[in-house]
Amino acid sequence: MRLQVLIAVLTLAGVCDATHLSSARLSQVYDKMNSFAKYSWENGTKAQAILEWTYPDLSVFSTASSSNPFPASLSSNQIPQIVDIARTTMNNRPATNASGIMGGSPLLEDGAAADPASLGGAILLANVSTGNAAVKNVGYGDAARMEVAYLLYGVPRSNTGAISHRTEQAQYWSDFTFMVPPFLATYAGFSNNQTYLQIAYDQCRLYRDRLRRPMSSGALWAHIQGGTGNLDPGLWATGNGWAAYGMLRVMATIQKSQWAGQMGSQRGDLASWVGEIMDGCKGYVTPNGLLRNYVNDTSSFEETSASALIAATGLRLSTLGVTDSYVPMALNLLSSASRYVSNSTGVLEQVVDPLDWSKQGQDSPEGQSFMIMAYAAHGDWDRAGRKGATGVDGDGLGGYTSGAVARWGAGMGATAVAALVAGLAVLA
Ligand SMILES: *[C@@H]1O[C@H](CO)[C@@H](O)[C@H](O)[C@H]1NC(C)=O
Ligand SMILES: *[C@@H]1O[C@H](CO)[C@@H](O)[C@H](O)[C@H]1NC(C)=O
Ligand SMILES: *[C@@H]1O[C@H](CO)[C@@H](O)[C@H](O)[C@H]1NC(C)=O
Ligand SMILES: *[C@@H]1O[C@H](CO)[C@@H](O)[C@H](O)[C@H]1NC(C)=O
Ligand SMILES: *[C@@H]1O[C@H](CO)[C@@H](O)[C@H](O)[C@H]1NC(C)=O
Ligand SMILES: *[C@@H]1O[C@H](CO)[C@@H](O)[C@H](O)[C@H]1NC(C)=O
């Protein structure tokens, strides 16, 4: 009897620590990502997550020597999930405006000049996979080219040359860094033109110059600055995730490109700018293992979607061979965010409302994608030999769980253990 109770206590302790989502749960997370995504940037973020999870050899994060993110050809059914998103985008695309400046035309009509560009990478891959097939009389490759011309010549600029996040005025949003520079960098790879890679780097630099706020360690980015109306000087967690992950994608694109050797200093800058945000976050991870919606504001709620994106960044810094020093923080964040995935639906809970950055929402399409990116990164990190996992048990996520049960388990653990110990005392 006593032995059985002891086994129960030990088993419970194991369950409390387990936060690695099972593959069945991750399929639910993926399905919800697919069904929730609706707006341009949500579809673009989803395309990126699908690339990393389902077609990893086409992602700039792949470390396989055989991988090529800028293939000259792909068979027509090789990337159906990406072509699906690209086709939907082309069907929603406004008719080409022949009078657009320098032949520019956005992929989608959107008040955010930057957001449709998040779909550009999917469009370029669909171009290769379909042989520049036409949708509504416009070829995928032509649509990508017009999107680039729109960004370069049609969108307002700041006095330093930063391309605006918005269509109506020059304004900096940290979100831009994920939407535009990675697309321009990818376009460089597909068009064999280094100029676009340099522009991608320059735009990251200009956005950092304007939004960066030094912290006691590292720095964090303000959310929205410049222009009028809608300003948000706060250090929004998701905005810092957009910035860090966007710059990391540009860095990885340089690394994968034919110009990796020539662009060492740009690579180094981007890596250090990503590291600076990771350092900025480090001091603000809560005892519960999450980042707050506004990172340095203790009255702000603990937010899981940005926590997942920063976790993905930390693990990718390791798999890309930049540094392992953010691995423990990343594992802590991912393990904590995993406890907020509903064990019945696969929905990531306690997320910021994607349409109102000041409020907590019910669910988040981008949050679902961030979890997939983080687990894709974790899988690669695990297979690469779990570098930097000092003081971390196993895979850093404590084995497998079916979902939110672990959160309740952790919360109730002390009570349950006390009850079992009491039971043991009675039996003894
Ligand atoms: C995003 O994708 C969904 C289908 O998954 C589609 O219904 C929606 O129109 C797309 N949004 C845009 C802006 O193209
Ligand atoms: C076409 O583009 C021009 C230049 O950007 C703009 O002034 C005009 O309003 C656009 N026309 C339509 C019908 O969208
Ligand atoms: C689109 O694909 C065609 C080949 O099918 C290629 O010639 C063209 O360069 C591609 N366009 C872009 C922008 O990559
Ligand atoms: C590369 O792109 C830039 C910017 O559009 C253009 O000015 C230049 O001519 C292109 N270079 C080549 C070799 O096509
Ligand atoms: C957070 O950091 C910013 C930038 O340094 C600062 O302006 C702000 O007052 C800080 N907020 C809190 C709540 O400490
Ligand atoms: C989800 O968690 C609840 C609460 O711990 C538990 O009762 C339930 O059995 C779990 N459901 C599944 C499908 O794992």
Image (tube, rainbow, N blue to C red):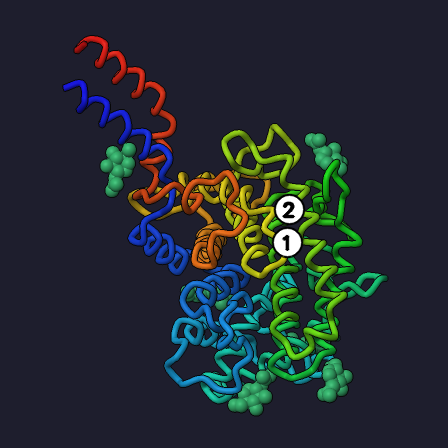
Report the image quarter containing ligand 3: bottom right
Seen at 71% across and 79% down, the residue is 194
On the image, the x and y values in percent for residue 174 come to 67, 53
Instruction: Count every numbered label the image shows and give the total.
Output: 2
Q: Quadrant of the N terminus?
A: top left
Seen at 58% across and 35% down, the residue is 285
Q: Is residue 380 above or below residue 154?
A: above
Q: Secondary structure at mark 2?
A: helix
Q: Is residue 160 above or below residue 349?
A: below
| Ligand 5 within 8 angstroms of badge 2 C-beta | no
Answer whether labels 1 and 2 touch (C-beta < 8 Å): yes
On the image, the x and y values in percent for residue 385 come to 46, 55
Q: Amino acid at mark 2?
A: Met
Any mark on residue 244, and which?
Answer: 1
Nearest to the observer: residue 422 or residue 33: 422
Q: Quadrant of the C terminus?
A: top left
**Mark 2 Cα shell of 10 Å, populated few (<14), some (14-19), many (≥20):** many
Numbered disc in front, either 1 or 2: 2
In-image side of 80 versus 257 (left or right): left
In-image side of 104 versus 81 (left or right): right
On the image, the x and y values in percent for residue 241 come to 60, 50
Q: Secondary structure at mark 1?
A: helix
Q: CA distance from mark 1 to mark 2?
A: 8 Å
Residue on which the image places disc 2? 278
On the image, the x and y values in percent for residue 158 come to 81, 61
| Ligand 5 within 8 angstroms of badge 1 C-beta | no
Q: Is residue 365 visible?
A: no
Nearest to the observer: residue 135 or residue 121: 121
